[in-house]
Image (spheres, rainbow, N blue to C red):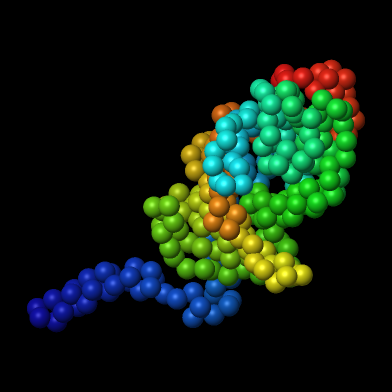
Amino acid sequence: MRLVCRKMCLCLLLAIMAPLVVHAQNPDTIAPEESEARARKVLNQLIQGLGGQSFLGMRERQCDGRRALIGHDGALAGYVQFRESWDYPDKNRTDYFAKSRNTMLGYIIGVQDLDITHGGLIITTFNGDKGWTMDKGGVSDAPDDTVAEFQAAVQRLPENLLRVGLKNPDYSFRWGGLDTVDLHEVDWVEISDREDRTYRLAVDRMSHLLVRSVVRIKNLDTGEIREDVSIYTNYQPKNGVQLPMQITRERDGRRISQLFYETCEINPALPGDYFTREALVQRFKETGGKKGK
């Protein structure tokens, strides 16, 4: 009887201690092969949490919502309505509907000289390595640095990392350990490329949804490290895909943007020329840059 009791106590002790051992495990002590296997397992769980085959089959996405206008000092300066459209991986068009004079919008979207002195319709379109803007003055090429920033952002989109990056031989994967982020127990996964960029994804252990993404980018000229953080909340199902309806972005600890989506549609069958300069020229002919959806 004593032997049976000892065995039962030992089993109970192991059951209690097992999760504590896992929780305390240092990711730096795990063999690289095991770390990569854990990371890929978490990422596959994330894909399933976001919708599985419905997520993987998402070609286009279009959402309407509000964007918070946040100044250099981090203070809220109001909101602007917008419609954001994606044709993955690298085509984006955003229509902004400004109600009145706005001194912040050009700075926020990376185009300083937009004609928005009395509000109106402003559109930015990116298609790979090309970009254009439309305002009351007509259609013009986007600045080179704005296009370059878009191309860099495309590479770190979770949609692209999960659907393309997992197959990229230039990426390495590492399990970053357990943590508590925004009251969620998460697994951290680290993805590194050959250009000294590190992408860190915090994945909820219960829902398998993305809680945060952190991108560390090294300036090769100065050696300085920039950290961009995206916080994903208020997930809702849309055509079988779980979409975060609120995204907050921070840079080096300072909030730089906040998006509130009101409606979203998956694979809306956008026109074939929707992400072209010609589409903007036609839109300008129809509206003259005046506000209207």
Residue 109: x and y in percent read 71, 41
At horizontal 84% and vertical 38% (from top left) the residue drawn is 132
Report whether residue 45 is seen: no
Can residue 282 be seen here? The reply is: yes
What residue appears at the point 59 percent right and 31 percent down from the top-left corner?
Answer: 79
Tell me the quarter of the image containing the C terminus.
top right
Query: Up-down: is 19 above or below 266?
Result: below
Residue 44 x %, y %: 57, 57
Quarter occupied by residue 105: top right
For the N terminus, the quadrant is bottom left
- To which quarter of the image does residue 205 belong? bottom left
Residue occupying the point 23% across, 73% down: 13
Judging depth in this view, the residue of 188 and 5 nearest the camera is 188
- Residue 12 location, x and y as percent? 22, 71
Q: In which quarter of the image is residue 288?
A: top right
Residue 7, compared with residue 96, is above or below; it is below
Total numbered circles: 0
